[in-house]
Structure formats: C-alpha cells, structure tokens
Amino acid sequence: MDWVTCTHSAACTGIVRRPYGLCLSHLHPDDLTATLAEMAPGRLLDLRGTVLGGDLLTRVLDATGRRPGRTRLDRVRFTGDVRLSGVTFAGDVSLDGALFERLASFFGSRFEGNVSLSGARFARELSFHGVEVRGRLSLDRAVMARDALFSQAGFGHGLSCERARFDGFATFDGARLGDGATFRGTRFGRTLSFRKVRGGALFEAAHFAADAYLSATGRLSAVRARADGILDVTVSDGGADLRRLAVAGATTLRLADARADLEGAVLRGPATVTGRGGSALTSLREVDAPSLALHGLDLSACGFAGLVHPAGVRVEECRFGMSARGVREGVRAPVMRWLTRRSAPARGQATRPDERATGTDDARAGGSPANTHRATGTDDARAGGLPSHTHRAADTDDARAGGLPAHTQRAADTDDARAGGSPASTDRGTRPARVAGRGAGVRASEAGSRHP
C-alpha cells in the first residue's frame, strides 16, 4: 500500500484523516462530522482502504453534493448495498482491488473520466445498466460471482475485461463500445449475451463454459477461444478472426459485409456459416468440422488444405474463383467433388483426335480398330443395317487388296450394277458407293431387291 494506514489496529488498511491519525470509519462522531464538512463537489475524494457501510457511504456522497471530483477508492470494502443512482463523477475513478460484499449498482450514474475496477470482487450482483462512461472502463482480473449487467451502457473509449471472471449470467446487449471491448483470457461461467453491440470485441483465449451469443460491428476476434456449449456469432462491416476456435456445441456464424477466418477451428457440433452482401470466408484450412454448411459466401480466396471432413461440408449459393463474375452456384454434393478439377470428356462427346487416328492406323494395318463397329462384316451390315462407316472400312480393305484406290473400286461396282451383272464387290459383301457416300444405313429388304 502506498498510503499511511489507520492507527486503530494493524488490520485496518484505511487511509488516515489528518490530524486524527484514524481512517474515516474509526473517527469519533464529532470528528467525522467535521471531516465530512470539509468535503465539497468537484474536490478530491480519497478513501483508500477504508471500510464503508451503507450509511457512511450515503453521508459521504451527500457531503460531496453527489458530484465528487477525482475519486480514489482502491481496496475499499463496501459492507452494505452500493447504489450510486444520480451520482456524477467529475474526474477519474479508481476502485482497484475493491470488495463489494453486497449489491453494486451503478445504474443511473455518470462518469466523466476513466473508471478502473481492476482486481475488484463482487460477491453479489453488479449493474452497469445504462451507465455512461466517457472514458474507458477497466475490469481486468475482476471477479463477478453473480449476474453482471452492462446492457445499454456506453463506453466512450472502450471496455477492458482481460482475465476477468464472470461466474453468473452476463449481458452486454445494446452496449456501445466506442474503441472496442477486450475479453482476452476471460471466463464466462454461465450464458453470455452480447447481442446488438456496437463496436468491435476481442475474445482471444476466452472460455465460454455455457452458451454464448456474440455480435459486433467491425472486428471480432475469438482466436484460441473455447466454448463448451452453443456459440452464436454475428459480425457486420468488419471481420471475424476465429482461428483455432474450439466449440463443443452447435456453431452459427452470420456475416454481413464481413470476412471470416476459421483456420484450424474445431467445431464438434453442427456448424453453419451464412453471409449477406460482400461476405467472404478466407480460410477453412485444417478445420475439423463433421457437419459444416456454407451459404451465400464468397469462397474465391478460401483455402481448403487439410480440411479434416471434406464430405461433411455443404455449399449453397456461394461464389467460387472458377465461376464467372457475378454467377452464384449451389452445390449440395460433398465439397471434394467440386474442389477437384477434372478433364474427362462429357457424355456423348466425340473421341479425341489422337484416338481416332490410332483407330484408323489399326484398321489399315489389318488389326482391330478402336471402334468395334468398323470390324463388323458385310453380312451383318445387310442384316442389321450398320452405319455407313462400317462399309467404308470394308471398301478400304477391298481397294487395297485389288490395288485400286477406294473411290475407283466403288466406281467399278456402280458400272457393274448398271450393266445388270453382279457387282465386283458382291463377293466381298460391299454395297454401292452412292449409298456409302451418303452415310446412310443399309436396310436388308433394299439389299435383297437389288441383288436377288
């Protein structure tokens, strides 16, 4: 302690009131009255280490006109209810290490400067509902054993709750965070409601032992945070850094013109990420999520390397880098089906040119071509009406056997047919060249009528 303590006993830590050598709580009644009379609005109020009951606190506030100036209440022990409605603190307020044994209500009060409650302990409920703090409020390492209410409060230069402990229900709904809020390493023992909050928030390495509902405008970070229940996050006009996040229950992430990074996250329960406007997901690398649904997101820059359960990812109405600009695609199949680019020809697509060339070479060599229809005999063609390319292949073989080009041989067959004789190609089972040239199939009845 950096102040002279009360001489009433060694256990008393209250700052002495000169010239008495005693703290305010141990003064004789007459001396107490004289001391209170010296207090005035806007002046320094220094009661460090003093034990303040409910009646004594009321007398002090009345003596300052409920408008004290710079206030130093470090390590003060409040044994009764603390109700500061209507009190305006004109200067900075320090309550570091203070102990509130009963209700601590700052509802209706106003702080013109900064407020520090670092290391403070609240045995009962704490209420900052609707409080206006023009400066910054610090609750670093503070312990709140019961419910803590910060809804509708305003913090001009932000809120700091690093390594704090909220054992009861905590709500910050509708709070205005100014420069943002920090909950690094903080533990929330029961449900946390952080809805419709204006400003950014950092929950790095925080522990949510129960359900948590978070929202922020700007930046929200929950790097290495752990949630034992449901985690519901809403971020607008900013970004969500959720790397290495671990959630045991269901996870819901809503983005509105915001970006999110989930690299290394472990989402044991069902997880859903939805986006509006220009929302994007930048990384799913090494994400362990058995069930993950993505909707309305820009995934053009998203990394998927090391995704533990790709089959559990479902994508709907998302945009990808391989899509045309502005095109929205819906994919319901597992994500690996569209992550892998394939070059196989579509159904019904013609064989590649190199395959056709190979087949032709085989046919010329006398072997089996790639297309089995080309190897079909002419008798089969008469009976089944095979396509014309079968007959052209046969014509080519016959022409080679006779030493004539294919078109010469077909012309000779045509002349024989006109003369009424048997065509030269009859023994080999070929059909007239004019039919083969048109590429039409041969019907058995037509062949029989021309060649009895």
Image (tube, rainbow, N blue to C red):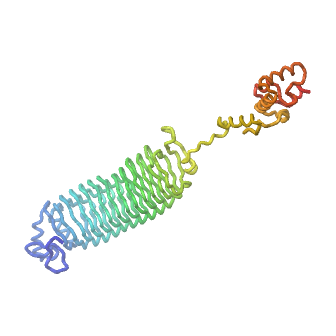
The image shows residue 201 at horizontal and vertical percentages of 35, 55
Name the residue rendered at 39%, 49% in the picture: 236
Left or right of 8? Residue 161 is right
Q: In this rendering, does residue 85 appear at all? A: yes
When the figure is inspected, residue 151 is found, relative to residue 35, above or below; the finding is: above
The image shows residue 265 at horizontal and vertical percentages of 45, 58
Left or right of 387? Residue 225 is left
When the figure is inspected, residue 4 is found, relative to residue 228, above or below; the finding is: below
Name the residue rendered at 89%, 28% in the picture: 448
The image shows residue 114 at horizontal and vertical percentages of 22, 58
The image shows residue 82 at horizontal and vertical percentages of 25, 68
When the figure is inspected, residue 148 is found, relative to residue 301, above or below; the finding is: below
Which quadrant does the C terminus fall into?
A: top right
When the figure is inspected, residue 289 is found, relative to residue 318, above or below; the finding is: below
Q: In this rendering, does residue 441 appear at all? A: no
Name the residue rendered at 89%, 24% in the picture: 422
Name the residue rendered at 30%, 67% in the picture: 142
Which quadrant does the N terminus fall into?
A: bottom left
The quadrant where residue 20 appears: bottom left
The quadrant where residue 152 appears: bottom left
Between 43 and 290, the residue placed more toward the observer is: 290
Between 381 and 444, the residue placed more toward the observer is: 381
Furthest residue in direction left, as rendered: 19
